[in-house]
Structure formats: structure tokens, C-alpha cells
Image: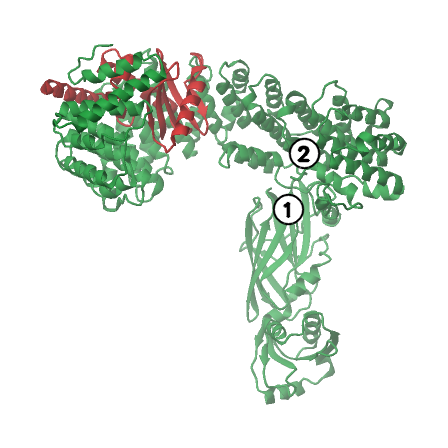
Chain colours: A green, B red
Amino acid sequence: MPAVSKGDGMRGLAVFISDIRNCKSKEAEIKRINKELANIRSKFKGDKALDGYSKKKYVCKLLFIFLLGHDIDFGHMEAVNLLSSNKYTEKQIGYLFISVLVNSNSELIRLINNAIKNDLSSRNPTFMCLALHCIANVGSREMAEAFASEIPRILVAGDTMDSVKQSAALCLLRLYKTSPDLVLMGEWTSRVVHLLNDQHMGVVTAAISLITCLSQKNPDEFKTCVSLAVSRLSRIVSSASTDLQDYTYYFVPAPWLSCKLLRLLQCYPPPEDGAVKGRLVECLETILNKAQEPPKSKKVQHSNAKNAILFEAISLIIHYDSEPNLLVRACNQLGQFLQHRETNLRYLALESMCTLASSEFSHEAVKTHIETVINALKTERDVSVRQRAADLLYAMCDRSNAKQIVAEMLSYLETADYSIREEMVLKVAILAEKYAIDYSWYVDTILNLIRIAGDYVSEEVWYRVIQIVINRDDVQGYAAKTVFEALQAPACHENMVKVGGYILGEFGNLIAGDPRSSPLVQFNLLHSKFHLCSVPTRALLLSAYIKFINLFPETKATIQEVLRCDSQIRNSDVELQQRAVEYLKLSSIASTDVLATVLEEMPPFPERESSILAKLKKKKGPGAVSVTELEDSKREGGELNGGGDRGPDTAAMAASNTSTPSPSADLLGIRSAAPVGAAPSSAGSLLVDVFSEAGPTAPSAAVNDDGFLSSAPPSEDPAPPLSEADELLNKFVCKNNGVLFENQLLQIGIKSEYRQNLGRMYLFYGNKTSVQFASFTTTVSCPGELQSQLNVQTKPVEPLVEGGAQIQQVLNIECLSDFSEAPLLNIKFRYGGALQNLTLKLPVTINKFFQPTEMSSHDFFQRWKQLSQPQQEAQKIFKANHSMDTEVLKAKLLGLGTALLDNVDPNPENYVCAGVIQTKSQQVGCLLRLEPNAQAQMYRLTLRCSKDSVSRRLCELLAQQF
Amino acid sequence: MIRFILIQNRAGKTRLAKWYMQFDDDEKQKLIEEVHAVVTVRDAKHTNFVEFRNFKIIYRRYAGLYFCICVDVTDNNLAYLEGIHNFVEVLNEYFHNVCELDLVFNFYKVRTLRGYFCPVRFPNDFVNTLFRQQEQRRTKGK
């Protein structure tokens, strides 16, 4: 037993602890404890009043027993009694017991709170601290309710001792974390912030923790702390190593306080005040300079404390991401650490550089360290350091070094720690895809990946390579050849068999010319793996076989033989059995034509987010820097933009099973059959085939002095309007707002308003993909004579539309004279490298410039008669296309812009309207009469206008509406 | 932010555990075992930092004792590492050449000193005052 003779030692306690330690068995220990518990119980129940020392000793023993893991159901009262002792050691044990064994017994809580209250108002700093520690340790809601309002007062009171202030700040922090609603800073805010100026460094250190937490929640209320923090930091940084005396740790002045100040600043953007910012930049430079100075001590504590500040400063520099000079200096400093003999520093430098790599200012500087990082990946003994090196390689990868980095990561995979293999595989797959310049390299990389780390290649990875091969016809032959070779290996991973089966089933014909890979050889190779594979893979192989029958009729007999054998057609697995039966039947019944149609090559996959990327995001959480960075550059690159997120297996089956609906249809992928028709005919350019022949150049648009683009003369080769453009136009005759156009890439919405002969139209272009549209231009043109009839002005739009973003364009329209054509809207942009060119008709029709005119029955018929020249009237009798419901018709006629006149027509079934079309040159009065015949489902529409062309145009437009 | 503090010996016996997050007893036991397993396999060439669940552990070994702090991944590794060392210096000064048994027999004192573990407040003068206060009380108490 060690000497326990230190003043306040408790001999009885030491003896008891020794006894427990000497117990040979668990039973002996329990026996000893029970004996002690009985003893304590009898003492507490005894008639003789216990003195403070004994009470303290027994309570402390109970605490020890509890900490050994035994339940304690008495002694609480005695502990509460200790709280009112005037001796520090007794009070301390009382509080300790309360803090560790909180009891929700309401009677006790009241007593405890009372004792705490007494101590808080005792003006004895040690007692106050004990009470504050107890509140913080318990940290319950009840405690917060009782004391949350009291503690801020203690914290900012002028006469509070420094030690108490520190405890108060930390206690408040704890209560704020557990019950933020009860800690109301309000009036105290400014005084708490000013604790940063306190003379006592301990108070500043404690207060800054509280302020940082509060600033994260309410940054605006606490933003005055920025300038105070900067000046405090500046004073510390510029002080000599001896200035701060007790706060100097191994020759580093106040390291923890410095770190905390730098961290607080990371809650805010760079200071706006130039002077404050200048001072801060100076501090950061000083910190960077100090890193270069020779160490003042050889002790690791010195360098650790110094570097703690340095790394925190670098975090702040990265957080601001606005000082290229500092970023590059930080990067160089970290570069030195990469070769430091301290493993800790190498680890931290790799970690910190990872974030630096994503800043545009320092990306290049980071790249210069590639060899060192690769070396770290190969030679570091600590797996977590190697992991950081792999992360950094991933972060610094770009087009210039992708091949080298991917190769290094692949070779590292062979020996990589099992815990990080899956993530490594995903990273390699993503880098290979993102920076693939030639696709044969991409295919090689992924197949290598499967070869080296097949078990860690998740479905997403091999789905993706298939998606890309399907979507890129230039790589299909190479892929077929490579998988064929890879399958030659005596032991190959099941994922390789899957990819092989799929690719040979689709593109085996591309290598069938070579006798070494003739159809039968291919089939035998695949089938040699069949029996070693799991059910899903076998199912996939069966589908590959039926595709073989289509690709190579000469294999039909062999394959039918295989399908017919008992192990297939009577397989105990329902899925396999069904496939075997159905494929066998299909191959024997269907004619070659039918077979060719059913088993046609898979259509390209629609572009969606890369499935691998989605997987990595899920692994890393949405905040992962590397992922967002990746997406950005993916948009820039955008070369590999085929691919979707459905499994190719089900999709492949879709084509082959459309003719054989079965109960397990969706297992076989019937649901995925829909995209066959809708899928684009070439990768990533949904519209390009439709329009590419039509529009090679953008119409040249003249720029006026005022920066507006006037409606340009029609260019030589505008893309012809969409076939449905007229239909789209008709949708907007009676309404002003809505979606004009939508396809898989783009949505165009319209809002418009008209007054007299002027109109304003808002166009909203929404990018529906996750990929950026580049060179986005829109041109409004007025073909032919429309040029002199309508004036449309617009400003050019931003050339880049981010994935998922929407941009807006305003058109100002002026109607010069009546017109019958619609202006054309041409949209061009690059999506994944392919030019999209699309022309729509803008729904600007003559009726938009209607002013409604109210008039009596008498007036109406008088004017009707006045417009009696035959050319002024246009009439049409047509069948109803839509509902003949009165309310619907009324709404449409009002949407037209005219006044709907009641009690004018003698027949109440008929509708009459009147309005004036406002153009710059003249006004055209129009009268309209619509006579529905519900029985015949017919209408007769008559228009009389002061201008004959208007009558005709309105009649045409309106005939489509009812 | 500190999630928990553990002091364990090589055999995995806990000498101090302080939790700053809500865990139930089973979970605490599991964490203690996991930390022990993660930390004891590492040698001097390894870093003093280990990723642990969604957090990280900063640890340092002194003779047979492992001092471990579990913090958020964004926290400053070196600051906490030196925080540990600082705490050990405080213990050393208080117990005059601290050893594991000191922590066993004086568990109730260690719990008070634990306040000086984290670098939140740790300045030497404060520790000194504390020692002085306790010293005075000791003499008065007699």
C-alpha cells in the first residue's frame, strides 16, 4: 500500500481500497464490499452522530464501490449533509458524490439546489467554484431551470474572482449545450463578448469556448467578437516567449488560447474592416514565419504546441480561401512536414493538404508534392497515414496526373489494408471515369480493379463500366476483347464473370471474327465459369446465352442443349428455372426476326448522376469536400456522360422479356422496358440527333449600343422549329403563364404580362440534369415580315447554367402592327460536349394586345353591322375538341383578353366578346361571337374586326382553343 | 468538442472515465473495450491519432497508462495531445511522481483535477493556486 499520509488522506478508505485490490476472486471482492456496505449502513443508522470526517470517509467509500460497478441505494442524505460543511474536503466529496450519483428524488434535489444556492452566494470563491462544477457536471434540465438565469450575472459581475468567472463561463457553456432555450444571453451578450479583453488569460480561455459555441448558433449577435479576437490574437502572437509567464507552455505563449481564437474566427467570413483584416493577415504571416524559426527547445512539447497553432492558422487560411499568397505559403510549409520524422506531423500535413487541394489558389502548389505523397502511400507504417495519403492523391488528381495516380492507387490496392479497400476501389473507379481521355484506358483500369480487389468492387462500379461501354460504341470492341482475355485467367472474380457475360452477350460479335475468340470459344469460356457462380450471376449468364443465340445462330444448338439439361430447366431456383424455360422456348418458337427484335442490343443509358459517385457520397456524407470538388470537375470534363443508375442486368433482361410477361416479370426487368423507346440514340446528347443536322451555327445577333440584343434577322441556318411548336404555342393563346417546353434536359417556363401594345415576358430556363450547360445562348428572332410588326428586345443570358439551376431572361415586346406569325426562340448549349440546338415558337399572339371593351347590346349590334364588309368577317364551324362546359368556355374567352358581354346575344347559349387590339400604328376593334351546339358538339365562331388580317388570324387561333 | 476522456492501463482497466455525451452503461462498456482494442495495438511509430467511429481519439501512453480523449474529427489534434501532456504534468506535480496507484487511491482527487485536463483552462498559475489552496486546507485541517 502506498503511503497515504497526505494531510487529507483517509486511512480507512486506503485500507478498504487495498483490501479490494488484494481480493483474489470476484466472489471475495463482493463479500468484502457487502461487509463494508453493512458497516457503513450501521454507522449511518447508528445513534451516535457522525463527525464530518467519518461522514466524508464513508461517502467516499460508497462512491468507490459505485465506481467499481455496484449499485448504491443509500448515503445520498449524508452526501447532501456534507454540502453544508465549511471544510473544503468534506464539501468537495459531497459535491463529487452528487455529481456522480444524481438522484431524481425531488426532496433531495430541493436540498441540493438549496446548498448550491448558498455556496453561489457565499462569496467564497472555492465554494462558488465547487457549486458551479456541480451544476455543470449534473447539467440536467432541472439544474438549468434553477440556475441558468443566475450564472450569467456571476460571469460578468465586476467583483467576481477570476477563478469563479472561468468556472461560470464553462458552466454556462454546459447548460447552453443541454438546454439552449433556458440560457438567454440577450442583455449579457456584449459584456460576455468583452470578456475577450479580460486581463486574466484564464478567463479569456474559458470565455472563448462559450463565445465560440454561442457564435455558431447566433453569428450576427456575436460578430463584434471578431475584432476583439483579432487584437487579442495579435497581442499573443507578437509577444515574446516569456511575456506571458504562466501561460507559456514550453516557450510557446498561450498555445491553447491561440488555437481557440483562430477557431472562433473560423465561424465568420474574413473581417470586412480593412484595418482588422490587415492585422489578422499580419498575425497569420507571423505564425507562418515562426514555423521557419529554429526551435527554442528540442522537446516535442514545444514543437507540438507551436504546430497546433500553425495548423489552426492554416485551417483559417483555408476557410477564408481568399489570400493566394498565404495559401501557397501554407502549402509549402505543409510540404516540409510531409518529410518530417514525426509521424504525427506527416499525418496532419497530408490531412491538411487535402483541403488545400480543393482551393483553386493552391491546387497547383499541392500537386508539386505528388512524388512524396506516393512514397508515403507505399512506405508509411501506419495505415491511417497511408489512408490520408490516398485521400490526398484523390484530392490532387486532375487530368494531368490521373494516369499516374490511378496506377499508383491500383498497385497500392494489392496490399492495402482491408478496412479501406472498398473506399479505394470507389475512388479509383471515379478518377478513372472522371479523367478518362481514352476509354480503353478506362476499361483496362476497371477490369484491373475487379481483378485486384474483386471482393471490394461494389455493384455500382461494375454497373458503371457496363453503362459506359454500352453508351460509347468506340470502346465496345476493345471492351469485348479485354474481358475475353481477362476471363482466360483460371481463377477470376465473379464480378469479372458478370461484366464478361454482359459485355460478350452484347458485343461478342465484335471479336467473333478472330478464330481464337470464335462464338463457340466465347460461349465455352463463359460456361466454364457458370457452375462456380452464385444464382444472380448464373441468371445473368443465361441471359447472355440467349443473346448469343441471336448474335451467333451457329451456337443455337449448343446453347439449347445447355438450357435443356436438367440442371437448368429443373433448377431448384425459380428464377434460373424460369429463365431456362423461357429462353429455351423463345429460341425454339420465335423466328429470327422476332428474336432479333426481342434481343436487340441494349439502348444507351440515360444520363444521371454517376452511381459510383452517389455511393461515395453515401459513404462519406454529403459534406465531403472531395465529392463536391469531384462533381465540379466532372461538369468540366463531362466526357463520360452515358450511364444511369439502374442495374444493367435488369435492363438487359428488359429487352429479352418484353414478349414473355410472367408473374416474376419485374424481377426480369419489365419495368425498365420503357426507356427502350425513350432512350437517346447517342450518349448524353438527347436532342443532338434530332437537331444536329439542322443548326450548325448560332444566328448572328447584332448588339445595339444600349447593350440589348435586338431581334436579329433570321440567320442562314436556324434550327427548324420543333414539330410540336405550334401545339405548344396554342396552349398559351388563352393563358400567360406556364411551362412552355420540357424535355429530359431542359425546362422552359413562361410568365408574361401585357399592357396596351407592350408586353414583358419572363423566360425561365431550368437545367434538369446534374451537369452544367455550357455556352448557353438564346436568340429571339422575328422571321419574315414579323420583323416590321413586332419588336422584341432582350439581354443575353449567362453562358453557364449549373446542374439543377434555373436562369431567367426578360423579353420586352412591342407590337408595332398586327401580325400573324410567332417570334422564334432559338436555344443553343453544350451538354456534355454535344451541341444542343432547339427552336421554339414564342407564344406571342395578336390577342395578347387586346384591351377589353364593355358595351351594351345596342352598341354591339350597331358595330357588328358596321363591320359588314365580307373581308372583315371570318367564320369557322368546327367540332369541339374540349369540354363544352360553360365555365370553362367563359374562362377561356376571358383569358383571350376580350370583354365577355352578358345579355347581348338574344340566345343565352351564345357568347359574345368585344375588344380593341392595341398596336403602335393603329387600333383594331374586334367583335366575336361563339355559338355552341351542344347536341352536335359543334361550334360556330364568327369574328368581325376593323382589319381583315386580324379577323383571319384570330379565327385561326381560336378555332384550336375550344 | 470533447466526447469522452478515458484513462486505461494496458490490461484495459479503466482508471478514469468522463463522458461528455449521453451513453447508456452497455454502450459505455463497449466504447471502453473498443478504445482499448484500437489504442493498445499501436506502437511508437504510429501517430497519436486514431479514427474512431465518427470521431477521433487522441491518445498518449505514459508507462502503462493510456490517456485517451475522444474528440470531433475537425478538432485540433496537437492541441489536445498537448492537453493530455499538460494534465499529466499537473498530476505529476500534485502527486510528486505520479504512478498508476496514485490514481487508484486518490480517485476522488483525480476527478477534481480532471478539470485541468482539457486545454480549456489550464494555466500553470491556476493549478498553482489550487495546490496552494489545498495545501493550506490540509494544514488547517490538521
Q: What residue type is labelled 1?
A: Phe
**Measured Cα–Cα span from mark 1 to mark 2:** 29 Å
Query: At which x and y percent is residue A596?
Result: 85, 41
Element class at badge 1:
strand
Quarter holding residue A609: top right
Marks 1 and 2 close (CB-CB < 8 Å): no
Left or right, A805 with reference to A115: right
Asked if A581 appears above or below B70 in the picture, the reply is below
Mark 2 crowdedness (10 Å alpha carbons): few <14, some 14-19, many ≥20: many
**Which sits in the foreground, B60 or A735?**
B60
Query: At which x and y percent is residue A920?
Result: 59, 71
Left or right, A889 with reference to A576: left
**Which label sits on residue A463?**
2
Element class at badge 2:
helix
**Which label sits on residue A829?**
1
Residue at position x 70%, y 37% from top? A648
**Which label sits on residue A651?**
none
Residue A41 visible:
yes
Instruction: Name the quarter where the N terminus of chain B is drawn.
Output: top left
